[in-house]
Amino acid sequence: MEDYNKIIESLEIRFIKAKNINILKPITIENNYEVENFLVLVTAGEIRFGKEKEVAKEGDVIFVPGGRPVSMTYGSGKPISLSKDDFLTNKDQYLKSFEENSSTDEHYSYVAFDAKAFDSVNFFASLDIPPFKIEEGYKLAGLIRQINDEYVGNMPGKDRIVKVLTESMTIELIRFILNNGLFVEKLATNSTYFRDPRLIDIFTFIKEHLAEDLSNKILANVANVSEDYVGQYFKMLTGINPQDYIEYQRMEAAVNLLRTSKKSIRDIGKDVGYKDTAYFCRRFKMMFGIPAGKMRRRESLMNV
């Protein structure tokens, strides 16, 4: 248990956004990909998720880890199936945010957040776990409600309270995983590699040099291992090869820049290590299902 305490202590937890959403029409979004993690509380109706279309009903919470595509069906009845791109073009026909009591029969609340070990590694993405359901009654539901209530309010100290509640929510999520014996082997692997200083050096170097050459040869020098061995070493500890990890980090940084800056798509691509803008745009759409420009419009318009 001490190893898990060290992982929790290493986490940089960051609130991103929270919303209450009305479901206007049933819809399925296939291969929905998000950088951040989501906790979704079904407040009325149902949501189906994952390959098996598991059903979550009122009071249930769904954890959707960032960094992997997942199918999401909002609402009961026969849904319309759309790509992420098509959904964002017509989103107000299907889902709409609200700040007061809902007038629809089906609705949900969510909190989006980051949890990074050593401010470098997306903790839940590193577990490579599927989305899963937390059944009605667990305290996570109450925390999601509290965060949403604070976020839409205007009381002094709102941001501080939201930060504290998001940290509590993340720790409760990890406790749920541990108490229910979920993904034990992957958690044990994480506790091992988070103790390896050479790997932490690689994570830190990648974060600080995203715009530069991050070939295996460069990473081998950082870890003081051979170029032939560094890919094997990285994958042995993390379960993914270093170049896949680097692309994920670059795309995560690109999303953050799209949200927080007015830089051009070309400059953002360069800032995260892509000299070829067209290639950056192709990879971005392949990963997220929408063009980079539409991601920016989505954020600027405060989409669901």
Image (tube, rainbow, N blue to C red):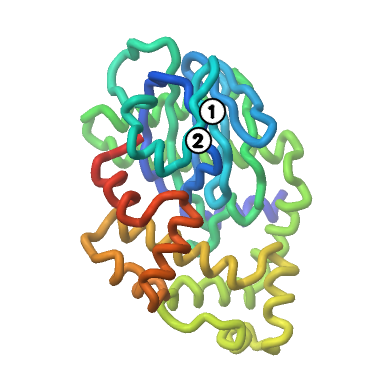
Q: What mark, if any, has residue 73 been given in the picture?
A: 1
Other residues around mark 2 within 10 Å, as few (<14) / some (14–19) / many (≥20): many
- Judged from the image, the secondary structure of the residue bearing numbered disc 1 is strand
Image quarter for residue 215? Answer: bottom right
Residue 39, image x and y in percent? Answer: 51, 35
Q: Which residue is mark 2?
A: 29
Residue situated in front as seen by the camera: 281 or 187: 281
Q: What mark, if any, has residue 223 been given in the picture?
A: none
- Quarter placement of the C terminus: top left
Q: How many marks?
A: 2
Q: What residue is drawn where x is 45% and y is 44%?
A: 113
Q: What residue is drawn where x is 32% and y is 13%?
A: 101
Amino acid at pointer 1: Thr
Going from the N terminus, do you reach mark 1 or mark 2 first? 2
Residue situated in front as seen by the camera: 265 or 46: 265
Instruction: Give the answer, above or below, for where 206 lies relative to 255.
Output: below
Circle 1/circle 2 CB separation < 8 Å: yes
Amino acid at pointer 2: Ile
Instruction: Give the answer, above or below, for where 16 lies relative to 226.
Output: above
Residue 162, image x and y in percent? Answer: 36, 37
Image quarter for residue 25? Answer: top left
- Judged from the image, the secondary structure of the residue bearing numbered disc 2 is strand
